[in-house]
Image (spheres, coloured by chain):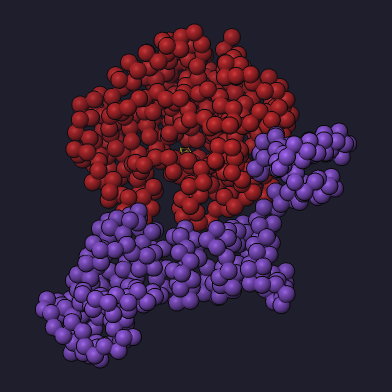
Chain colours: A red, B purple
Amino acid sequence: MRKSEYFPQKVYVEKNSLDFPLTKRILKNVGPVPSEVIDEPQEVLEDIKASKDAIGEGKKYLLISRQKGKFVKPCPCTPGYLGCNYFILNIDLNCPLDCSYCILQHYLTNPLLTVHVNLDDLWRQLDIFLNKKKHRTIRIGTGELGDSLALDHLTENTADLVSYFRKKRNAIFELKTKTVNIKNILKIEPAPNIVIAWSLNSLKIAQEEEKDAPSVEERIDAARRVSDKGFRIAFHFDPIIRHPDWEQGYKEVIKKLLASVDSARIAWISLGSFRFPPSLKSIIEERFPRTKIIYDELIKGKDGKLRYFKPLRLELYKKIIGFIKEWGDEKIPLYFCMESEDVWREAMGWIPKGEENLEAYLSSPLG
Amino acid sequence: MKKQNLSLKEIFLEDERFRISYYFSLEKQILSIKKVGLLNPPLVALRDKQFILVSGWKRVLACIKLSLFSIPVFVLEEEDDLKSFLVAFYENLATREFSLLEKAEILRRLKKFGEDEKSIVKGYLPLLDIPPTVSNLESFLAFSGLEPEVKKIIHQKSIPFSSVRMLVGFTTQERKLLLPLLFPAGQNKFKGILEDLKEISKRNDISPKKILSSKEIQDIMGSEKLSPLQKSDSVRLILRKKRYPALSLRKESFDSLLKKLRLPKTVEVKPSPFFEEENFSVNFSFGNSEELQANLLKLQELSSRKEFSAIFKFK
Ligand code: SF4
């Protein structure tokens, strides 16, 4: 596992991204790592794509680029299942960690780790977006197309993001990570609408399927430190994966988690069982030939993604919810990521009526 | 390159170093030569004082079948194998589509004649409409190394690359056990058998050979009552059940409930795909209003029966 911070083997800077303050900051923070200015990344990409493991190879290099499209997008919730009305912020693309199940392997066409540096455009776009949504509370985060903190020692973006969002009271801003890269977070003043979240899994899954990620214990410890600093924290058991002794595996982690952090500081815990588009399967098979997780009873769901046969999903959810209720506060808000109404009803005992109902539920601890 | 007439006996066909096409039918080629003659002379090259064929196997074999004595050929003066092969490659590339097997043979030749891996991936895979990745190259190379009888089935059944890729992951012995199952199967079943077998094997840490050699499967394969297609279907069913035990069990109990309900033959009650949704569907056909009414009455009667409510346990 990668205990230390990530440093690329080389940084590529697109010529038109050279003069941004964030570019200068990253180049300073990478220290002696070589860098090269390029007109456009096509040639580098072609070289990487011709290597045996293009996805793994791409993670070794950092591309500094400009976001030419939109920084803010709705989270691509899946048709046929209840979404959680989340918005994603695309500043960093891709992730230096290497989880076998990572959806980005299928989703991203550019295998390079990419940081978008035109932050002035980001703030402008965010102002417009939040103004449009000013009559409701929205949840927004950076951890969908990458890990929110994995590059923070290079970009130091969290400080800017938190200081922007602390003033935006109609937004709950979430940083989602599997790392313990919290040095910068611990220097920032907390705010009630800022949530730092960790993705957790059973020890076995974390060890076998989350390559280069810190151990679950280290993540929980980082969460505790951030919570002690005054931040609200959240957890994502996603993807929940069946494996021999899964019940014991998840029980152990939940027990450990809820004994380490104060339930009252937990903004939410989300649950999502393992699911993926069928085309990811061959990528996982090729990159992680020893994994068995893709050979369980996965069926094609209403959205075309592979997911566990429903009775198996229900069994997972009911057990895990039971563990959370047993060791944590009954009031910790729980929600499913991409599940159907009947699963909500059967496992949670209620169904959110529309997106706003779920939003109100998840933002209720804000008061 | 010069054109000359060459006696067919002078072409040393045992040297197949440039050959990429196998398992073709000569009928149409023979007809064409009979009707209009050999308009497009094959390409040969001189190696160790012998003429060997660079391209035009189908044409030459058809001429032999027609017992022609000599034919016009182009003689390549190039001594380098790679350069000679590329002449034939580009000539063919411009005029026809390559089959999967031909693509595999082309890639094998390129490698054998000294083209480096990176150039093949970047330069040739896109020309052959193959996504340019090393793993695709590796799979095609492995395909070209398969046993001739396996290659023949793949070629004849136009098996897609995704299935070929799975097949190369099995051992020679396993492929031998698989052949009688795959031969009668269509493309989808072919893929299903391979996929289920591979995945059960990986999930349960049992070799495919051990699964295929189980008594249950061997009994089917040895049965004298079953046709090859029935054997293939029965084994596929066993593999399905092993691969998806909970789903298969649910399907079986749903089907046995339906059996107990004794639905009319024209009425079909179905769960949603993989029991994922809470709804069921009813299909029935009718040819006149009496039949429609009879079906509706039967359904109404059925829905009021206590046993029928058991169906909702399958939600
Ligand atoms: S931490 Fe998240 S983004 Fe990074 S590799 Fe793992 S799943 Fe993908």
Residue situated furthest right in the rendering: B306
Q: Is residue A124 above or below residue B60?
A: above
Q: How many marks?
A: 0
**Lateral position of residue A104 relative to residue B202, left or right:** left
x, y percent for residue B235 = 66, 65
B240 or A209, which lies in front?
Answer: B240
Q: Is residue A161 visible?
A: yes
- State the image quarter where residue A152 is shown: top left
Identity of the residue drawn at 39% across and 20% down: A161
Residue in view at x 59 percent, y 73 percent: B180
Quadrant for the C terminus of chain A in the image: top right
Q: Is residue A159 left or right of residue B163?
A: left
Compare residues B27 and B129 and report the one nearer the observer: B27
Residue A356 vertical placement versus A50 (above, below):
above
Query: Residue drawn 28% across and 24% down?
Result: A118
Q: Quadrant of residue A22?
A: top left
Image side of residue A279 versus residue B299, left or right: left
| Residue B100 horizontal/vertical position (percent) | 39, 64
Choose top left, top right, bottom left or bottom right for residue A356.
top right
Q: Is residue B313 among the parts visible in the rendering? A: no
What residue do we see at 32% from left, 73% from top? Answer: B20
The x and y percentages for residue B24 are 38, 74
Residue B196 image offset from top left, x and y in percent: 60, 59
Taking the view exactly as shown, the residue that stands out farthest to the left is B2
